[in-house]
Amino acid sequence: MGRTLVSPTDSHPSVGGASVARTSRGFAEHLGLPYLPVVIESRGAAGAAAGPAPDVASAVALGGSGLRLGYGRNTVVEDLSVVLPTGRVTALIGPNGSGKSTVLRALARLHPLQSGRVDLDGDTDVAELPSRVLATRLTLLSQSKVAPGGVTVGEVVAYGRYPHRSRWGGGDTDGAAVVARVLAMTGVQDLADRPVDQLSGGQMQRVWLASCLAQDTAVLLLDEPTTFLDIRYQVELLDIIRDLADEHGITVGVVLHDLDQAAALADGIVLLDGGRVVAAGTPEDVLTAELLTRTYGIDIDVETDALTGSLRTRARGRHHRRRAVVVST
């Protein structure tokens, strides 16, 4: 928990034409999200004071142990354990079908456990937390979120404040400032009054991220957040994620397909295959040519970028032969 940068405001403010406190049970159902009539103080990324992340290398904000996960009778994850260190960015990578998204959803209590346990802060079983409490401590940006027609960007982002409101929509005195801040942070402040059905896929992805940040939690989970984004907004979004950990001490767990993005962004990487952890550690530990080639089933070269110092990968297909350069004399 950190200090808030925002000042008390009226309980029914307006941000980008959207009333922050107007969300009703019906609007929540319209968005396909739970309505939680509760006011609980929380300070995460949106309300925390900027500053260096604490020395928390040994602390675990969220972890799963002995996880067995599946769909019906089909088990896709078997006896898997994973930890997200406090204030760090952990990337989950692996081939399609390796269980990355399933594990992330299980950590967020959105996928049932066949066995195992998920804990917050090392000793709090998430299965025992009321939904309204869990919603103030972690949030997930999933791949498949669909906003209904007839609502604006500002309204969708403001709905991220739902755990902090009373049954009648009041009590969230920080809401207007938090929403304004995350709109600016994600670069969608100029879209606040625009109906969401007029947005591109990339714009909508940033709106959903803003809504998650407005929820103001200490743990942020993201499932392939760069999907639909052009290269500029991919880089900007990854910069935001890095800032959340470095400047606010937020714990981030993110599923990524792009190995170079994982190398540049993450403090730690978990490589999955077939529902099991192949390797976990620093990018240098995990992103080796041997491990990646074996896991992905294709030749992958790994080198260090001379300019950035980050690891870079290159998968070699049948048509990617190295060609000798002939220099005429």
Image (cartoon, rainbow, N blue to C red):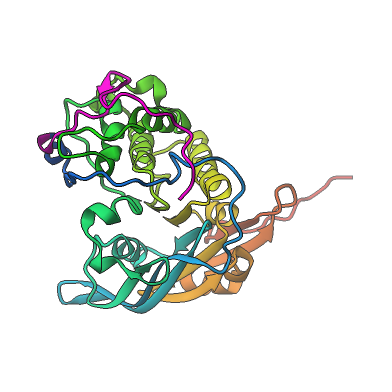
Can you give x and y, in whole percent of width and height, for residue 158 in the image? Answer: 29, 32
Magenta residues, as a range?
1-26
Residue at 55% of width from left, 67% of height from top? 299
Residue at 44% of width from left, 31% of height from top? 6
Q: Is residue 326 left or right of residue 311?
A: right
Answer with the quarter of the image where residue 211 lies.
Answer: top left
Nearest the viewer among 191 and 54 is 54
Above or below: residue 75 compared with residue 87: below
Residue 140 counted in the magenta span: no
| Image quarter of the C terminus | top right
Q: Is residue 192 left or right of residue 3?
A: left
How many numbered marks have been drawn onto this rendered protein structure? 0
Can you give x and y, in whole percent of width and height, for residue 163 in the image? Answer: 26, 44
Residue at 52% of width from left, 61% of height from top? 318
Q: Residue furthest left?
A: 26
Above or below: residue 185 compared with residue 190: below
Nearest the viewer among 328 and 243 is 243
Q: Is residue 96 left or right of residue 315?
A: left
Can you give x and y, in whole percent of width and height, for residue 56 in the image? Answer: 57, 62
Can you give x and y, in whole percent of width and height, for residue 233 in the image? Answer: 48, 35
Asked if one can make out residue 296 in the rendered structure from this viewpoint, the answer is no
Above or below: residue 200 compared with residue 60: above
Residue 17 counted in the magenta span: yes
Above or below: residue 126 compared with residue 245: below
Nearest the viewer among 125 and 149 is 125
What is the magenta segment's predominant secondary structure?
A: loop
